[in-house]
Image (tube, rainbow, N blue to C red):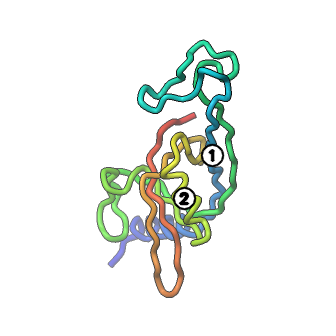
Amino acid sequence: MIGSLGRVRIRHEIEGLNLNDRIVAWIPAYTECAETGCGFDPISRSAKNISCAVCSGTGRTETWGKTYISCRASWTDVGRPRFGGVVTTDILGDATLETRLPHKELMEDLRDKEGAYIDLDGRHLRVMSVDVNRIEGKTNVVARCEIIHEL
């Protein structure tokens, strides 16, 4: 039998599953510096000419792409009991995002591209893994994320 505290916790979990969050995905695109004698050196991860006036000594310029995504976000609380056991951040990360299948490529870009991140609730998240789940005929993309910066 579930006590009143248990019912409140279960209701809170179910309400959290139904919330839709709108996240902002930021993905940088890097362009090599066009100045003669400059450019990005991947070995040292810096400019070939650190005093270049065109790229300010970075060896490349960056342009940020911004995309809005509707998803279901849930924060991982260490040691908090959930359905199926105790959740630990060592396995799942700090947050789990669930979105529709058409966003799979975008989530993979967020995972694979250097500097890409998600802005959610004043926190910047890095995607660590992307999985596809199919439950009862519905296919979703699940991304496990870690916090890299809090505002």
> Which residue is located at x 51 percent, y 68 percent?
141
What residue does disc 2 label? 107
> Which residue is located at x 39 percent, y 68 percent?
6
Position of residue 70 relative to residue 95, above or below, is: below
Position of residue 19 relative to residue 120, above or below, is: below
Q: How many labels does the image show?
A: 2
Name which residue type carries label 2: Met
Which residue appears farthest toward the bottom when viewing the image? 137
Q: What is the number of the mark on residue 26?
A: 1
| Frontmost residue, 102 versus 52 | 52
Q: How crowded is mark 2: few (under 14 residues within 10 Å), some or many (20 or more)?
A: many
Q: In 3D space, how far apart are the residues under numbered discs 1 and 2 (Cα atoms)?
A: 11 Å
Helix, strand or loop for disc 1: strand
Judge from the rendering whether residue 5 lies leftward or rightward of residue 60; answer left or right: left
* Residue 83 image offset from top left, x and y in percent: 36, 70
> Which residue is located at x 56 percent, y 17 percent?
49
Helix, strand or loop for disc 2: helix
> Which residue is located at x 54 percent, y 29 percent?
40
